[in-house]
Amino acid sequence: MMEARTIERFKRRTVWFHWIHTIAFLALLVTGAILFFPSCGGPAAGGATRIIHRVAVVIFVGGALAYIPLNPKMALQFVKDCFSFNKGDLGWMMAAPDYYFGGPEDKMPPQGHVNTGQKMWQLVILGTGVIFVATGAIMWFAKGSVSESVFQWSLVIHGLAFVLVLIMLFVHIYLGAIHPRMTESFKSILTGKISPTYAKHHYGKWYDSLQK
Amino acid sequence: MELTRRDFVKGSAGAAAGIALLKPLELGKKGNGAQQFDNLSEVAMLIDVSKCIGCWMCYLACKRANGLPEVEQLPDPDNPPELAPATWTTLFTKKESGEWHFRKHACMHCTDAACVKVCPTGALHYNELGFVQFDRDNCSGCGYCTQVCPFEVPQLQENKVSGDCQMDKCTFCIDRLKKGMQTACAEACPTGSIKFGKRSELLEEGQQRVAELQKTNPKACFYGGSELGGLHVMYVLEDSPEAEGLPTDPKVPAAAAVHDVIQWVGAGAAVAAVAGFGLNYLVARTRIAREGKE
């Protein structure tokens, strides 16, 4: 049932940013996976994927930096959220298994603009982003000028960050677009809007703060 | 007749003599080729540094046999060429108490090769004879090999602007071997310093030679017998490996070994996640639907 009134969950520019970031991210992920899994290495022959990887990372990092002046409030909130885990998040974690396996909705404590799981995803994106850029820069610019073991461990850490972000991306896609309970989540990142009912059920604390 | 280092240094005027020596050299005409081996995967090379006179014949023959750009002048031992995509073998050189000392340096064709382990495209792989083969067409130019080889053999020619990269290295003259010939460097060596043959025999011969040298030189040692699963290029050294520009006890770097594990962890976790979501979807959908009806 569609309600006439909608609530703005994301600004238009945030939606744009999300999808530009997604494209760059997927380009990085695919060209990276090609190098990561030896059985997928074929397309890397000739080196075109290395170029795509470099172009994509410029868009990925450049996009993130460009977003800051476009929506400073949200950008700051994003970073704050990454480091604002507290007791309340424990409640989410206790309730999450049953909730995501379709248990009763009212057992889940009310959440803010983003819930604990989303904060974890944000932290992974920010954290691995920094790790990817640092280790990637070593591999791109410092091959031969850093010691061989620094290069080798950069490669390993880049790979570990890849595994982490790959799994978390799966979780993000599943919960954002597929999970039977997240009925308006995918729509919200296309239109930026959600229904008041959805907001009340999924982000109770945030919904209440909007009513003030 | 075999030349000795003293004969060569005394009798030659250096560069010109070297080029003159190579001129009549027709590769592939000398005996002791690969045709005598039933099983080419048993072959190897033994390099006796005590017999090397630094004539650069191996260096020149390698370039000629492999169609690499040839040189006008013999290299200067004070400033020997580094390995590069166009230089597959060179000499490690040093001068001690007025005497030159040389060690031929090229791909060792490790049995347990770090470069093969990290190569993401399989451009570096073991060929059917067990040598480390490089297929230029499959190379992505990532340069991981250049950072893990304990012998610093793979070298990248990299254009930082275009991102274009090229690597190339010794093939153990695989094409010549298949035609029944021996490696070009071994064939060109005028002193018998580079020997091509059956690995087990060379191993024995080299160890005997070391024992002989040790009578007057306690530092003499054998190298490559068991390092990295056994090298296909083994050495009779006159000094410790380090003093000869070789790592003592070379290893596949731990980081390169870890890489394999992470790949499996990554693949396993990805499969587990997808399976978990499938299960979650079915359970959650059923329970939510039931709740909706109530």
Image (cartoon, rainbow, N blue to C red):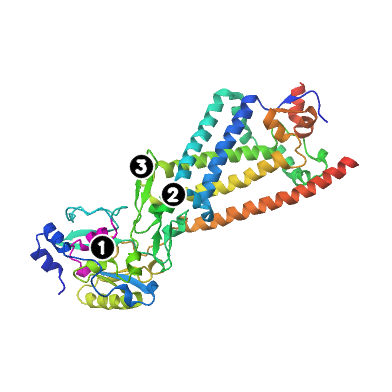
Do the dots labelled 1 and 3 sit on one chain? yes
Q: Mark 1 points at which residue?
A: B104
Mark 3 falls within which chain? B
Dot 3 amino acid type: Asn
For badge 1, the amino acid type reads: Lys
Mark sitting on residue B159: 3
Look at the numbered disc 1 and give the secondary structure of its residue: strand
Structural crowding at the residue carrying mark 2, measured as other residues with C-alpha within 10 Å and reported as few (<14), some (14–19) or many (≥20): many
- Ranked by sequence position, the earlier of labels 2 and 1 is 1
Q: Are circles 2 and 1 on residues that touch, CB within 8 Å?
A: no
Q: In this view, does A32 lie above or below B28?
A: above
Which secondary structure, mark 3? loop
Which residues fall within the magenta stretch?
A: B49-67
In front here: B42 or A74?
A: B42
Residue ID at (62%, 53%): B269
* Distance from Cα at disc 3 to Cα at disc 2: 13 Å
B3, B203: nearer the viewer: B3
Evaluate if marks 1 and 3 touch, with contact meaning CB atoms under 8 Å apart: no
- How many residues crowd mark 3 within 10 Å: few (<14), some (14–19), many (20+)? few
Residue B88 location in percent, x, y?
30, 57
